[in-house]
Amino acid sequence: MATRPVEIREGHDTPGHHEEPSFFVKYLWSTDHKVIAMQYLFTGMFMALVGGFFSYVFRMQLAWPGESVPLWGLVTPAAYNMLITNHGAIMIFWVAMPVLIAAFGNYLIPLMLGCDDMVFPKLNRLSYQIFLLSVVVLFSSFFVTGGGFGGAWTMYPPLSGEAAYNNTPAGQTIFIVAVALEFVAFLLGGINFVTTAMNSRAPGMKLYDIPMVVWMIVIASIMFMASVGPLVAGAVMLIFDQTLNTAFFDPTRGGDPILWQHLFWFFGHPEVYVVLLPAVGIVAEVITVFARKKLFAYKTVLYTAIATGVLSFTVWAHHQFIAGIDPRMANIFTVTTLLISIPIAEMMFVYIATLYGGSITFSTPMLWALSFIATFLVGGVTGIFLGASGSDIYLHDTYFVLAHFHYTFYPIAIIGTFAGFTFWFPKMFGRHLNETLGKIHFWLTIIAFNGIFLPLFVTGVLGDNRRIPNHQVYPELDNPLMNGLREVATVFLVVMLLAQFVFFYNVVVSLVRGKKAEKNPWKSNTLEWTADSPPPHGNWKELPTVYRGPYEYGVPGRSEDYWPQNVPN
Amino acid sequence: MSSARPIATTRSASGMPTGRLAVWWVIASEIVIFGGILTSYVMYRLAHDSFAEQAAHTNTWIGAFNTFVLLTSSLMAVQAHKAADSGDGAKAARFLHYTCLGGILFILVKSFEWASEIGRGYTISSSPFWSFYYTAAGLHALHVIAGVVIMFIVAAAAKQYRDLHRVELIGVYWHFVDVVWIFLFPLLYIAK
Amino acid sequence: MIERFLPVASTYAGDIDFVFDLIFWTVGFWFLLAQGVFFWLLVRFRKRDGVRAQYVTGELKSEKRFITIPHALVLVCDVFIVFFAIRVWYDVKQHLPEAQQTVRVVAQQWAWSFVQPGPDGRLDTADDIKTVDELHVQVGTTYHFQLVSRDVVHSFSVPVFRLKQDVIPGRVITGWFEPTRTGTFDIQCAEICGIGHGYMPGRIVIETAEQHAAWMASHSNREIAAASGPAAGGR
């Protein structure tokens, strides 16, 4: 099959019979990878709004404790805990993962590999439906007696295992069920990503001809699969502890709460890289196109990604340095944690080196991709403080940690998504975004983002602990400097959230009135740009054949400065 | 996926059938799930001597019998695969039905065993050992039930000589279920 | 750097601050260098008419140098940081100097209580001194603390000591500190422990030998603690 270059595709319905499918079948019950990608994308964006709103409420409380928050009211301690817990869980499980892995993975993998759909389209649909169900389940937890779960997204027992401790008898179980459903959705989705990338590549596409973002999503899916298992087992155990009164994590009956922390972080740390890798993949695609440059040392990038993936399974206990584990273990995990800085630093060096000798256009997607590199560097270097056991004794669970991981997750989940979304928007919807509005949105967002989290590094170093609704309870934390910094962060958060209206306005206006996009507006090499904008069902009339790698820009001796993968010579 | 299979499904750039890749993916993810629960169990076991005393109340003979049942059913799955390879769908279906029978027998014995243990007061909330005992074996039993259901569906198709490659796939899965039990049996029954 | 904003009140607080500063300057240098190169490249190679991008694969040895040399330097920095981090870690968490005093710290939803030996110098006897949300210690004395929790995971955090340690139900976790200056400072809970997590502020009062002796005398034989019974992991 792999050598058959030409295939004529009809619709999924009976061949030759072009009946327009109903709205329901076309958009809600579709097995088309592009439609499923859009479902994931828009669900993820909606959840980002929910998570963003939650952060607005608790940041208002932190800046002006005890005052009524507009659109919410008074923030009780129970509500505060529920808000921070669900903000964290939503942003990671229901925003970063669906958008970066599922949306971009579903959209790009078949298009970039030159095939007509995923290998298992119905499984793909099922994966989204389970994901949607997990969203519904999560939302239902906010409205049950006792309210939503408030034991932090890390769900440490015994707090999470016993209703008497967390005061959310129903919310605690519903929350874990929602998370578990989300895991199932992504395990099912992973089947498609990996099998499609392994088996359904276009004829002629060798392993090193695969665009980096596809590699990254595949590696991320494998890492997710390999790390989530113990936590699935842990989730079952925790649900049984809550509902069947088992004794897995109950210290009074021989259980061990620390076990949960191991199970959680064995998943939790690789999870960081699971969402990181797709984002750096997107950035690789964007910077090569807008610098007109071949990706510097393709294989090095790939190997650093694999090295990061493997190493990330050996660092989990740095989340538990001071959690009562054997102190000797901390030494091992300090070494592995600092070791992982090497492949990641190397990846950033490669990206910076890619810019050398380029011809850089500062379009909106490029601005996002470049700001990813600049801001992710902040997140990277501040991680060293926390990976080093000696300084973590003090910094653990302070706002320094919080600012650090927001400087990693924000570039990943928000900046990476905007880079990808603005880059592939012409392909997805057949129209261009407005460049001016895009740049206004970019600058507002990026300045506000730094305005939120730079002050929080400072308050963290000065002693602010996480998950405390009112720092002014503590005399050492109640001083004009720290109160001022908290207010600054909150003001910038509001600016950042408001700036997103510019984005949504831009999207809506561009969808209606935007400039029509041709097939390949950015003069890019990869296969998705050879399909129509937007690609029809089945993507191509004739599936493409591949002749070279994806990053042949500026090849000497050619009149054009790009050389698409599907052009014979 | 019957009538309108995308071209993507028919390609095989790696040389491995896509269905087999998918089954290995499922099995890999199951291995880490069971790996998580069994590793947790072993950690507790090493930390608490009380586990050994409580494990003494499990019935090794029933466990051994069930091991025998599962191993035999796996043998039947191998025979079904052989028949499917030679294109004999009806024979493959027959052997798959024998395999199902093994699975059902396993579940029946298991229910009897659990009923008697619960009758003697060892429930899932008695102690960490019994929590693990019921959770790990219960999770495994769920896989047995799922396997039996899928096997009936595959056998029905095989009988009509459709999708014979699936006989191998469900067989691989069934061997995995078997192997999990091979780990569970000594851990829960023998190590006293 | 931290010491400019937050008093240093234990023997190892300065060491932890030192590790922080060390990392700050090391990674700060790298950070500025990387950002500097990055922004320089953006300006230097911005799109100009008639100038075409160069074709650089990054596969040649002469090109890879730009990656492998920084790679090796990062490794050297890592080794350097690991060495100092582990040295401080060993001092604070892994080794336990001889105790002159022992104090038991009991965490629960949502209060701290502290048990100190009375005149007989031993815990779990009738003359134990129990206090709630206020720990009195003597400057220049090596203390062992025993952390126990009555319900969920808490974290015993004393910022001026730069000390933080989770409190795990079902376990007794022992550590040490030696106060170096007098004063009254915060004790915080640093692990979410339910809806009252933000509202369990404790205070640590570091006193001179005379003050401490006077305090001991005034509290002997007086049970103040609301929490009663021998403190243990049970609920």
Image (cartoon, rainbow, N blue to C red):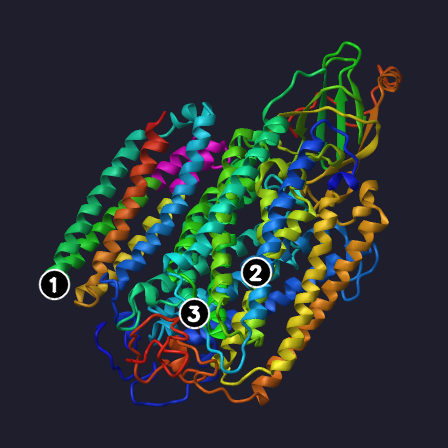
Chain letter for the residue marked with disc 3 in the picture: A
Callout 2: chain: C
Q: Is residue A75 something one can see in this rendering?
A: no
Label 3 sits on residue: A106
The magenta stretch spans residue B112: yes
Separation of residues labelled 1 and 2 (CA atoms) = 65 Å
Q: Which residue is mark 1?
A: B87
A129 relative to C86 in the view: left or right:
left
- Seen from the viewer's position, the closer of residues A113 and B91 is A113
Give the SS element for disc 2: helix
Image quarter of the C terminus of chain A: bottom left
Q: CA distance from mark 1 to mark 3?
A: 36 Å
Q: Amino acid at mark 3?
A: Asn
| Residue A461 location (% of width, % of height) | 72, 45
Q: Which residue is mark 2?
A: C37
Determine the residue positioned at 43% across, 29% down: B45
Q: Is residue B130 visible?
A: yes
Residue stretch in magenta: B111-137
Q: Chain of mark 1?
A: B
- CA–CA distance in space, label 3 to label 2: 35 Å
Q: Residues within 10 Å of mark 2 (few under 14, many from 20)?
A: some
In the rendered image, the vertical position of residue A450 relative to residue B54, given as above or below: below
Residue A252's label in the rendered image is none
